[in-house]
């Protein structure tokens, strides 16, 4: 289940739901902006909520609860054992530039130290849309024509060094 509030978030979830409906994997998903319907799905979420507040939710009955925090902790712990892995927190991708050799230069801002660094990469997967549009600039359509777009978009991981993939 996904739950959002506020006009911008409701518009985003409505568009996301419409996009997901194009895939047979999500055909059983339900969408609602109705307080009473959402209260049936998630009574504690709706308890005490202003009835005038714009809300929306998606729900699928075939889904299961997943502890994404634990999955993330285990994934990071596994990756940190590899010599070629580094984790950069408190960072924001500011620009992606496609180079003449089809590699990429990724400009990353360290939000704590307040400076940017450039990182060469052979492959970049990026998210176009909500968060990505706010934090990633300089992409343009020509940069992403070879990347397959999946429902819900990609986050912004970049893999490999030039020549290594």
Image: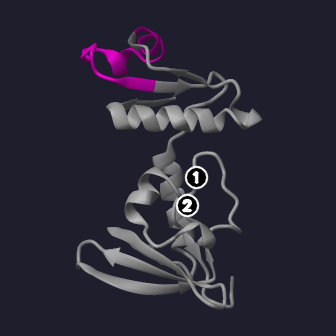
30 vs 130, nearest the viewer: 130
Residue 153 tag number = 1
Whether residue 126 appears in magenta in the rendering, the answer is: no
47 left or right of 106 in image? left
Q: Quadrant of the C terminus?
A: bottom right
Work out whether 31 lies above or below 164.
above
Is residue 89 in view from this perspective? no
Work out whether 15 lies above or below 54.
below
> Element type at marker 2?
helix
Which residue was labeled with disc 2? 75
Q: Residue at x 51, y 73 (%)?
A: 80
**Residue 116 occupies which quadrant of the picture?**
bottom left
Residue 46, image x, y percentages: 34, 17
Is residue 53 in view from this perspective? yes
**Residue 51 occupies which quadrant of the picture?**
top left
Mark 1 or mark 2: whose residue is earlier in sequence: 2
Crowd around label 1: few <14 · some 14–19 · many ≥20 (10 Å): some
Q: Residue at x 48, y 16 (%)?
A: 41
75 vs 41, nearest the viewer: 41
**Residue 146 occupies which quadrant of the picture?**
bottom right
44 vs 52, nearest the viewer: 52
82 vs 113, nearest the viewer: 113
Q: Residue at x 59, y 66 (%)?
A: 141
Work out whether 145 lies above or below 70.
below
Whether residue 42 appears in magenta in the rendering, the answer is: yes
Which segment is the magenta one? Answer: 36-56
62 left or right of 139 in image? right
Residue 76, image x, y percentages: 50, 64
Type of colouring: one colour
- Give how far apart the Cα atoms at labels 1 and 2 are: 20 Å
Residue 44, image x, y percentages: 35, 18
């Amino acid at each position: 289940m996904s739950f959002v509030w506020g006009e911008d978030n409701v518009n985003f979830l409505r568009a996301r739901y419409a996009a997901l409906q194009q895939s047979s994997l999500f055909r059983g998903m339900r969408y609602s902006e109705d307080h009473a319907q959402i209260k049936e799905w998630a009574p504690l979420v709706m308890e005490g909520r202003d009835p005038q507040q714009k809300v929306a939710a998606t729900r699928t009955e075939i889904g299961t609860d997943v502890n994404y925090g634990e999955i993330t902790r285990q994934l990071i712990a596994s990756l940190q054992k590899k010599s070629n892995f580094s984790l950069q927190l408190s960072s924001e991708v500011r620009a992606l530039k496609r180079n003449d050799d089809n590699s990429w230069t990724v400009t990353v801002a360290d939000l704590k130290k307040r400076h940017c660094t450039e990182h060469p990469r052979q492959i970049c997967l990026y998210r176009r849309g909500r968060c990505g549009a706010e934090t990633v600039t300089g992409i343009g359509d020509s940069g992403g024509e070879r990347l397959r777009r999946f429902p819900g978009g990609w986050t912004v991981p970049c893999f490999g060094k030039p020549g290594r993939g």
